[in-house]
Image: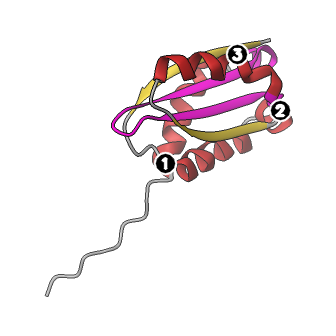
Amino acid sequence: MYESMTVQVRAGLGELRLAEAVGELARGHGVLRDATAAVRRVAVADLARVTAEVVADAPARAAGFQAVWLDAGEEGRLVLLARHEVLDALPWHVLLPELVAAWKTFAEPRIPVQAR
């Protein structure tokens, strides 16, 4: 059985950056290391319809924790899905802030600008 949380996110969330953040979270929590974690990006036009489809499809993917970025260009959603055994050890009020902190850690590298 899965529970889900949907969070509004800014454009350009970054699939690689999200995957790195989920990986960092999994390295820090045994329950996520033991459960398969999955990250994916889905380009969408209809956020409401696709959000419902992602939640309904969660059991078929069989990952203990899933982060699905619904990228609608100027706006987006992050659908987080977790099995109950994951949430028993790592509840949403802990998981979400740690995911945000890990995502911030993997900021896009900036090329230094040299003054002339």
N-term-proximal mark, 3 vs 2? 2
Query: What percent of the width, then of the height, locates residue 115?
Result: 16, 82
Mark pair 1, 2: CA separation: 23 Å
Task: Tell me which residue sits at (25%, 76%) in the image.
Answer: 113
Q: Nearer the viewer, residue 31 or 35?
A: 35
Q: Is 76 within the magenta? A: yes
Q: Say which amino acid is labelled 2.
A: Ala
Q: Is residue 95 above or below residue 88?
A: below
Q: Amino acid at mark 1?
A: Gly
Residue at the image point whose x is 49% and y is 17% from the top: 48
Image quadrant occupied by the C terminus: bottom left
Say above or below: 46 vs 18: above
Q: Look at the image and give the residue range highlighted in magenta.
A: 61-89
Q: Give the answer, above or below, for where 100 lies relative to 50.
A: below
- Looking at the picture, how far across and down is residue 101, in whole percent? 49, 39
* Circle 3 SS class: helix
79 within the magenta span: yes
Residue linked to disc 3: 56
Residue at image x 37%, y 36%?
Answer: 10
User: In the shown orientation, is residue 57 left or right of residue 54?
Assistant: right
Closer to the eye: label 3 or 1? 3
Name the residue: 38% across, 40% down: 73
Residue on which disc 2 sits: 35
Q: Quadrant of residue 2?
A: top right
What label sits on residue 63 in the rendered view?
none
Give the SS element for disc 1. Answer: loop
Pointers 3 and 2 in contact (CB under 8 A)?
Answer: no
Q: Secondary structure at mark 2?
A: loop
Residue that label 1 marks: 14
Q: Is residue 51 left or right of residue 10?
A: right
